[in-house]
Amino acid sequence: MAHSARRDCPELPDFSLLKTLARDHLIYLLEQLPGKKDLFIEPDLMSPLDRIANVSILKQHEVDKLYKVEYKPVISTSDQLCFLIRPRLQTVKWICDVANADKAAGKCRRYKIIFTPKKFYSCDAVLEEQGIIGDVTTDEWSFYLLPLDDDIISLELPEFFRDNFLAGDQRWVKTAGSALHLIHSLYGPFTKIYGIGRCSKMAYESWREQVAEGEQRAQKAEIGKVFLIDRDVDFVTPLCSQVVYEGLVDDIFRIKCGCVEFGPEVTSSDKSMKVMLNSRDKVFNEIRNEHFSNVFGFLSQKARNLQTAYDKRRGMDIKQMKTFVSEEFKGLKQEHRLLSLHIGASESIMKQKTKQDFQELLKTEHSLLEGFEIRESISFIEEHINRRVSMLESLRLLCLLSITENGLLPKDFRSLKTQFLQSYGVDHLLTFANLRQLGLLVEQQPGEMLTVMESKVGKLVNDKTAGKLTDAFSSLARKSHFRALSRKLNLVPRSDEEYDLRVPRDMAYIFSGAYVPLSCKLVEQVLDRDGWTGLEEVTKLLNGHEFAVTGNKGADSKAKSDAQRIVLVMFLGGCTFSEISALRFLGREKGFRFIVVTTAITNSSRILESLLDNHV
Amino acid sequence: MSFITANWNPLGEAFYRKTELYEMSWSLRDGLRDSLVAAAPYGGPIALLREPHRRSPSSRPQLEIYSASGVSIASFPWKSGPVVQVGWTVSDELLLVQEDGSVLIYDVFGTFKRHFSMGQEVVQSQVLEAQVFHSPYGTGVAIVTGSSRFTLATNIDDLKLRRLPEVPGLQGKPVCWLVLTQDRQTKVLLSTGPDLYILDNTSCTAVSPPGLGPQSGSIVHMSVSFSYKYLALFTETGHLWTGPSHLQDKLNEVDTKNTNPPQQMVWCRRPKSQQPSVVLLWDKLLMVVGVRQDNIQFPIEEPCVLVGELDGVRILSSSQQELLQEVPLVCQEIFKIASMAPGALLLEAHREYQKSSQKADEYLREIKEQSMLGEAVRQCVEAAGHEYDSITQKDLLRAASFGKCFLTDFVPDPFVLTCRELRVLNSVRESSVGLPLTHTQFKQMTLQVLIDRLVYRQFYPLAIEICRYLKIPDYQGVSRVLKHWASCKVQQKDLTDEAIARAVCVKVGDSPGVSYSHIAAKAYECGRTELAIKLLDFEARSGEQVPLLLKMKRSQLALSKAVESGDTDLVYTVVTYLKNEMNRGDFFMTLRNQPVALSLYRQFCKLQEQETLKDLYNQDDDHQELANYQVTASYREKRLDSRLSLLQSAVDEYNKAKNEFSAKATEDEMRLLRFQRKLDDEKGAGLLGLSLQATMEALLALGLHKQAEQLYRDFRVPDKRYWWLKLKSLAEKEEWEELEKFSKSKKSPIGYLAFVDVCMKSNNRFEAKKYVSKVMPEQRVRAHLAVSDLEGAADAAIERKNESEMALVLSRSSTSDRLLIDRLNRAATVAKK
């Protein structure tokens, strides 16, 4: 069922180099602390670390025992403790407690903290305040990028989203710039860089600075173009229910670092099983980008093919049988195993998603996107809240309603919020405050007030330095213009036509033909036009901060090489699997290959969870 | 030209030649007599301490520093203590080891840099002798003290003193000694007269050089080669023993017929040469001793000093400087009389060609017949590199250039490179610069280091010329020179800040890789803060300005620059700095003007200092945030009354912020909490902390209908919500009668399809059917389908004449239901009309 790909799609660069570099650096750092040592690892670094250096490699470099950082007193008996952590104050504080407890007990140990990807000054400040800066040595493991698949690279920084967009803390921007710099120095030079969003612009500038500081090596470019985009440019797409296989698997089972844990109901045994989901899984590779309605048909066809292949055994003589077993059998076995897993997963998804609720939910989402039957949608949401179906789902629908409708009417705003609080607890007052700040859930402003506010903020944003300062204002100014954007960019296809999901005609197929993801549409438009010309009205609606820069003179822009058709799209604040699928589709249509770099893989639940503020 | 071999002296299979490098431009009154002399290898500077033993304050010894060509660089009277030894570091810094064990470091211009001591105990026992040595780890110093103990510092830039173990039976200083670097270890080899010892970190081992018989007598002088590979020992009977420095083997033993110990003994060999030789210097005689018994002798007229180099020995006297070296093989082949080597023939051919003689063709033919032309060109190019005289260089290069015309596959790179490098070498060999580097030394020290040395000696224009000429990328070349130049420029005291800033800006411009902040830091170091600030203004990257501004206590400026840079970490640095620097009120005011810094500080406070956070909000009158803060705090509180009081203050703040919605919601929460507490106390219901909905659910599950009803009324819960709740709860508890009663209590606000669905969820079709008839017409088909009543569904659909509903029913019916399908199809066709 694979789509008829354009045959001239260029080859992707080999990103395993990134892993090798990270591993070598880690080993070097571990060797800086000779002798046996216990290693404490931050929980969310466990999986990424496992992709880079497994336990046996760590053991080879004199790591004795491995612990998870759990904010509890340590029980290690080693006299050397090594901590591999993100530069988070909370963790640093805990290490201080550990060291101070040892001191009080008269224990003498050596401590080494390895920050990844870099140390923040605030970490040093905490160490100093707690009086142990002299007792620990610190290092930085410059592990910026983890290749999750041939075309997905993740910074594995889920907190990027909240820190940057909610707290206005730009500490990770330079990290993003460094990540881009790393890619540039290995696979560049880039010929063209496009971007939209404040954070993108800052990351771009940080990267430029690093390029200017470092030496430049002439090399053959493997990546030609780069597109940077902020997550807050498009909140609609990640808030929609995903219906492409990979996205669905992520929504339901949560893919973690390219790996998913299927429970007993999927594996049809009594154990759960961890499965790597990437292009090396042949079955998965063929269905990951498919609309879910096609997946079953494909899987059953596949099962039939497999049966035929097995059936070849009949009527073989001994010699043929021998070659069959040695050559094909293993592959078939493997395929068989994967096939049954994915069939199990699909069944499980079906069970959850084919309930009437889900169909209604999708219908509501589609009406919100189209802007029809809004009252019905509001009552559906109301019912959803009242029945306490799922807190995150309710919140998601509320946000979707607010963004697509450019804010809620004051009456609806109050009543829906009251009902939400009644259902899910009053602590969500804080959640609402956060959502409001991000512009995800707001009250419709009476027309007049808005224009005054807009012009005020507009003035501030025009002034360059002021633009950098008006963080707090920008969210207020960031009123959503979804409807206008949707019209300008033709995001919602006309609904009266039949949409054949088996033969997608545009990127809308990832949402059952109801909506072309805004983020991906922007990428398409900018690549088509080689810049933002002609999109002025769109960028104005998106609050500006767009740029398109031609790369260094070093890169030969005229070269019509394959590299020019390799486009790196960097999402600052996370991207969803659906967007990746859409880009893959776009690539096949236009003869591009897209590489997605993201601060983390996200979906509606992850976005909303990061904005919850109930410390219960 | 033909006399080129005139100064060649045969020794074994090789030849040695003495080339004059310079007529020394100095005029020394007493020559080199009675002076401590130190000359740095690689054509480095020369330091002279005249009459080091003079101690009276009226006549102090004079310290003089010259370039290798004798141009004076610095000169001043030595006012510190008595000096035992003078030496140069690898980076051209002058070391003076004093009797009391302190070592003073000066730069090449005689400016004092720093000092260190070789240990406290040395002050008592005094340094008897000292040596400065170079190893892969840097420059080291070794001393022997009055108590006959050795102390070593392997690298003076990373000072670690090592006191070596005692040498048995040694009184005073040894007869002779030297420092060896072997197997990544630094050791001392010493002779006490009869015995030879090796001292390392832990032990003192007696050794004897293989093949050196006792009849030779005790060792009175020793020398190790430039690379620490070979050792030469001179005995009291005038025998010279040579061998590898690990003392496991022997190369040669020669009787020099000279029983006086030499003044100096230095190895002379070139890399890869198989014929190492030793140069010995006596009062009137210079002797080169090779691996065989033969030697070369040169008479000496005035006092000399030998300087060991990588590929030869420099001989320094008060009037001139010469280089003694083995003639490189390729030069031998070309210039040896009657040589038939291809290079020699090519040189001859070119010479004839210039004379317009047809012999040129004959020579050329001869080379070509042996198809050796490529080799001939290569030889000429290589030999040119080794020649010191520029006329000879030109002859050789012209010959090579002539020869390459007849080659088709000539690779020009080595030729071009040699031409360029020779030009650079010739210009640094100029007497005014005074770096007599050979090509081999140049290759070893690398171009980078050469430029560094020029910069260090402040030959900035020449360094820039060279960088440009050799097309070194700006980053490593011109920019680096400019950086040093500017750092030096800002120290010029006779110029105004204005003038210097302008001069620097004009010259440096925006050359890549030159950091103005670096230059500014230099200016600040020499106490010119204003100049530093002026220079910082040129710095394009605001991030670079911040640390220096902080250092100069311009913290406000630093904060705005940090914010401009967009680097949060940097902003944070400044914020922490300000926090400790200012009083709280001013600090908060400063932050207020910098929203980015403020939000950052808030983040920090959220994790570290909750109380400060409150103060911050208070100062800003940010009631909304204060209220949110109180709400957050209330969740950390275990006790109900304190929780309620926090919520009450939150309500107050919300009211001040005119956020009635949140105030109301918080008040509701307080009411709910009180209610839950009451019920928990009365019935042990365990409700505290649940949401309103969850509370009602729990109440209904416990059968406390009255209380649930009360909440429903008190909190004005929407009817729909309450109906859903009650419906689900009753169905879950399977109280079907109660449910039926409830359905009839009034018209359901959520319709009756919900009843059907909920009953079906509990798998009770019987109950579900009861409600089908009550469902509104437009949902009735779905209701019938939900209870799997196809007939009913079909009836309803036909009644409503709704095509899509009919299709829906059709899709659900199995093929055996012929009658039904027919009926639907018929109705559908009717409906279409």
Image: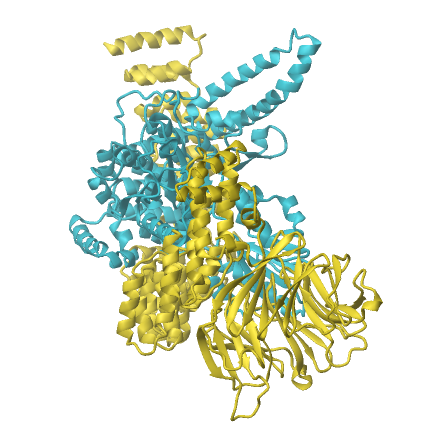
In the image as oriented, which residue stretches furthest toward the right? B214
Question: Which quadrant is the N terminus of chain A positioned in?
Answer: top left
Query: Which residue is located at x 46 percent, y 60 percent?
Result: B450
Q: Is residue A122 left or right of residue B544?
A: right
Looking at the picture, tell me which residue is in the foreground, B7 or A554.
Answer: B7
Across and down, in percent, residue B758 comes to 44, 31
Give the left or right position of residue B520, taking residue B40 as reference.
left
Nearer to the camera, B500 or A131: B500
Residue B545: percent from the left, percent from the top?
35, 65
- Residue B608's x, y, as percent? 46, 65
Q: Is residue B359 among what the camera can see? A: yes
Q: Which of the 4 image quadrants contains residue A367? A: top left
Q: Which chain is cyan?
A: A
Figure check: B420 above or below B308: above
The image shows residue A372, relative to residue B580, as above or below, that is above
Whole-percent x, y for residue A289 in the image: 43, 28
The extreme left residue here reads A448
Q: Say if residue B726 shows up in the picture.
A: no
Q: Is residue A412 above or below residue A363?
A: below
The chain letter of the yellow chain reads B
Q: Nearer the viewer, residue A382 or B602?
A: B602
Location of residue A213 (image quadrant): bottom left
Q: Nearer the viewer, residue A223 or B413?
A: B413
